[in-house]
Amino acid sequence: MKHFVTMKDQSEEIILQLVKRADQISQKGIPPLEKQYFAANLFFEPSTRTKMSFIVAERRLGIEPLDFMAETSSVLKGESIYDTAKTFESIGANFIVIRHTQENVASQLARSLNIPVINAGDGTGEHPTQCLLDLVTIYQELQQFKGLKIVIAGDIKHSRVARSNAFALSTLGCEVLLTGKEEWRDDRLPYRYVTMDEAVEIADVLMLLRIQHERHDQHMVLDQESYLNKYGLTIDREARMKDHAVILHPAPVNRGVEIDSSLVECSRSRIFKQMQNGVAARMAVIESLIEDVQKVQ
């Protein structure tokens, strides 16, 4: 594995290796790498969980993060994304982590740079490391993937998390179903849509999504209570879920919109467990990329 920019083309074998390695790291930890490495974290878009968990993952591996803030960088002087990334490669970064509002930017850099590129979210494209931590959480809870019914619920059209998860879960043998407002459906994803009332009764895993306001073409005034009652996880709907079913959410959570506030930390919620697994998942990806680079040197 030279880069980690998409889940669409990853094999079942590679995905499972990363899931199991991340689970192992979360249970037992991992010693720091013996050699010195530098990570260029290029975040052109706001981030809390992803950026901070990458930094924690890097530091636990003994890697020095090279901080970058777009608003104080040469980007303001007109420097391109490629030239910014190439600068970090030139001064000694061993890999690039990039988040950007532009779709496919990570893939474009992966074709141009000589160091590994990790996609930390590209517009409405993909978010593969978020997907991996979701998979780790599912694996820890249910110990399998094949035959599971996974329902992804919410703003499907504008969600990069939905795409990465749909691709990977299908590869792993899950039945992926979608639910959400009709205008937020994504025709690029060949999966069956169900109602939210159907979803809660059939799902082994219910993966909720926030409304991606920043990626909508037009500003929308939302009646939060109405949205929750029609499309969100209410207390009544949660009570009708299977006994073993779990709730996931990539966060940030809009309490009272996609999920009733009282359910965010209920007994079947694994939202904060996902965040915890984010560090181990990103450590597994970084470790794998560095190992593969060493093999060809």
Image (cartoon, helix red, strand yellow):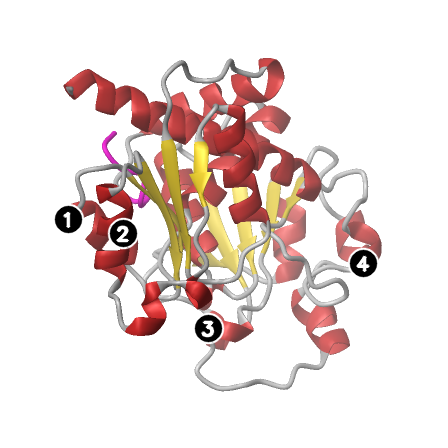
| Mark 1 vs 4, N-terminal side | 1
Asked if the residues shown at circle 3 and circle 2 are in contact, with their CB atoms under 8 angstroms apart, the answer is: no
What residue is shown with label 4? 261
| Residue annotated with mark 2 | 85
* Contact between labelled residues 4 and 1, with CB atoms less than 8 Å apart: no
Q: CA distance from mark 1 to mark 4?
A: 45 Å
| Disc on the earlier residue, 4 or 3 | 3
**Quadrant of the rendered image containing residue 79:** bottom left
- Say what amino acid the circle numbered 2 marks: Ala
Residue 125 sits in quarter? bottom left
Instruction: Kindly report the distance in space between the C-alpha atoms of the residues bearing marks 4 and 3.
Output: 24 Å
Percent across and percent down for residue 280 are 53, 28
Which of the two labelled residues, at mark 2 and mark 4, occupies the earlier sequence position?
A: 2
Q: Is residue 203 visible to us here? A: no
Labels 2 & 4 near each other (Cβ < 8 A): no
Query: Between marks 3 and 2, how big is the CA–CA gap?
Result: 24 Å
From mark 3 to mark 1, how far is it between C-alphas? 27 Å
Question: Which stretch is magenta?
Answer: 1-8
Residue 112's tag is: 1
